[in-house]
Image (cartoon, rainbow, N blue to C red):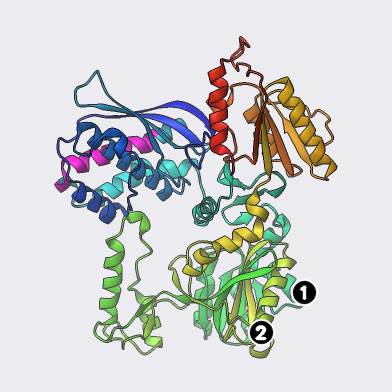
Amino acid sequence: MTQRLFAIAGFHGRLHQPEQTLRLRLSDCPASINWSALDNWLSDKLGLALQSSVHSAAYGAKQSHAGEAAALCWRIMQLAAELQRVARIPVFEPGQIIKLQADQTCAGAWLFDICVTRIDYVPVHMTRLVYDAATLIMLGVAAAPANFAEAEPLYQQLELKVLQPLRSVMVVGKSTLPLLACAYERGIPWRHLGAGMFQLGWGARSLCIHNSKVGSDSALGATVAQNKWVASEWMRRAGLPAPHNRLVANEQEALSAQTALGWPLVVKPADRDRGEGVVVDIASEAQLLSAFRHAATLSSQLLVERQANGVCHRVLVVRGKVVYAVKRLPIAVCGDGKQTVSELVTAANNEQQAMPSWDRAPLYPIDELSKACLQQAGFTFASILPAGVWAKLRPIESTQWGGLDEDYSISLHPDNAAIACRAAALFGLDVAGIDIISPDITQPWHANGAIINEVNSAPVLGQSDSSRRTLPQVLSGLLAKRGRIYIHAYVGTGQALDMARAQQQEMHAQGVACYLTSHNLTLGPAGAPIPMAQEGLFARCLALLGDKTVEALVLVIQTDELLQTGLPVDAISGLWQSEEPLASSCPEGLHAQTDIKDQVMALLDRLLIR
């Protein structure tokens, strides 16, 4: 159904992301479409909030055959973009319809050329897969909506045939999409480098990220932070309040640790994340041995730890400053004075089940552990909770089960903020999630026995309300001036190169490390040639954008290459041209026609910042 026309991921000024052009064929379009019912289905079953089309006027009224086909194509493009986001592929705009024509080979069929987002290292066949799937779904629902009233089979097919294959080509964590979405909204340039790693910003203002890890983090510090035993030793030596714990290898050592630490205790693997294998509130030898045996199934490195009084609080530190602090409460249901705990859990789970499968959180548990948590609070599953009263279903918050966050960013005590920043600096982390267990985070740690429980080198970002709200602050702390450098473009041959060199020399005299490149010549800040293995303006420019010594860039556009490739940047700071014609980028080396230069200038003009 789809065919890629151009494969190189450059900017042509039509989208705010790198572009590609696809040809999409719609056959068997329904003669009459209930648009309201179709849009409601997309919203209810797939969670798709449709954008209004800016192209419908170009194809006549929606009631015309061309108009209806264009309206259907616009929904296909939005659905394809949404499915890619569900698979954590960062496609943030549906694209544009460039051309529509009737398919002369088949009555009632239409051909569309569409401009859509291209993400580097997403294979061609995966792009075709998602647009073909979106086309089949849209045609099917438009033709026979009753067949899709029950969406669960569709979810299963999408998961198996579309989402899993898409996820396999870009394996990223939960933080990546929210971070990139925030960067996109704030005009911070970014590009996929492969293997789920992204570059934010250009040149000297660039930063590499992988999930929520940043390239400026200490690799050694991040490694140590993952080992809870060594990390606690580091903090103790640095004068920070660390857990009182013992590393144990067998049950006898666990019992000996209890003698030294007292009750209550916590048992946890020293090298696991997400709360895996953690058992709290241990108050007897039988509980201790049971917890040890459970944790031993996950790791050979086990900690027995004196349980600190209080609740875990996550403090996010970015470049030495606290961005937010939240109290992390376990998953719980809130009473309304009418329903039992069991009914509240069922209602919460029904609400989750009504969502698209990819939007569902873990279901609220009804098991022996939740029963024990309720009993500890004086409740049972049959209890009717008073209005506003919370009943927890797990002893602690964990990634596996989720939980509730209560914001303490404003009331965090300065002394607690200080130890969070000191802990991040100790491990050399520019982005760190510091977990402080405290009975009251508004009081200083040294007054109430609070401890730093863990230092997380890759804290999950963008999932809670507090984290989503502060993502702009996170990016501002990591990237100066939105990660952008000055990029100037000169169009022409010999004269344009002379003009570009003059500007480079002027910026060099001002102390700016300005580089210059054309399709076959690259100069360092002092004007000395830099050999490049790559040929072509696009490749050489892309290489310089990843060089952290580059503070400004001058492009000399001497051929019509970028009409095919586009530019690897979404904006330029300045644009000048000489009176010379451009050379052709084809092997014959003939001069391009005057209108080709006009096309190049028109493309660059769309990218010019005004």
Q: How many marks?
A: 2
Q: Element under label 1? A: loop
Q: Residue farthest to the front?
A: 579
Amino acid under label 1? Ala
Q: Which label lies toward us, 1 or 2? A: 2
Residue 273 in the magenta stretch? The answer is no
Give the side of residue 113 with respect to residue 42, left or right: right
Amino acid under label 2? Trp
Report x, y in % for residue 432. Answer: 64, 65
Query: Which image quarter: residue 390?
Result: bottom left
Question: Is residue 309 visible to the viewer in this orientation of the structure?
Answer: yes
Residue closest to the eye, 603 or 472? 603
Give the side of residue 287 with respect to residue 504, left or right: left
State the extent of the magenta-drawn residues as a range. Answer: 128-146
Disc 1 versus disc 2: distance between alpha carbons? 15 Å
Question: Is residue 249 visible to the viewer in this orientation of the structure?
Answer: no
Q: Element under label 2? A: helix
Residue at image x 33%, y 47%? 52
- With respect to residue 337, does 477 lie above or below? above
Give the side of residue 50 with respect to residue 460, left or right: left
Residue at image x 45%, y 76%? 330
Residue at image x 56%, y 15%? 593
- With respect to residue 549, does 97 lie above or below? above
| Residue behind mark 2 | 445
Mark 1 vs 2, N-terminal side: 1
- With respect to residue 525, does 293 lie above or below? below
Report x, y in % for residue 508. Answer: 82, 40
| Residue behind mark 1 | 238
Residue closest to the eye, 381 or 147? 147
Report x, y in % for residue 303. Answer: 62, 72
Name the magenta segment's main secondary structure.
helix
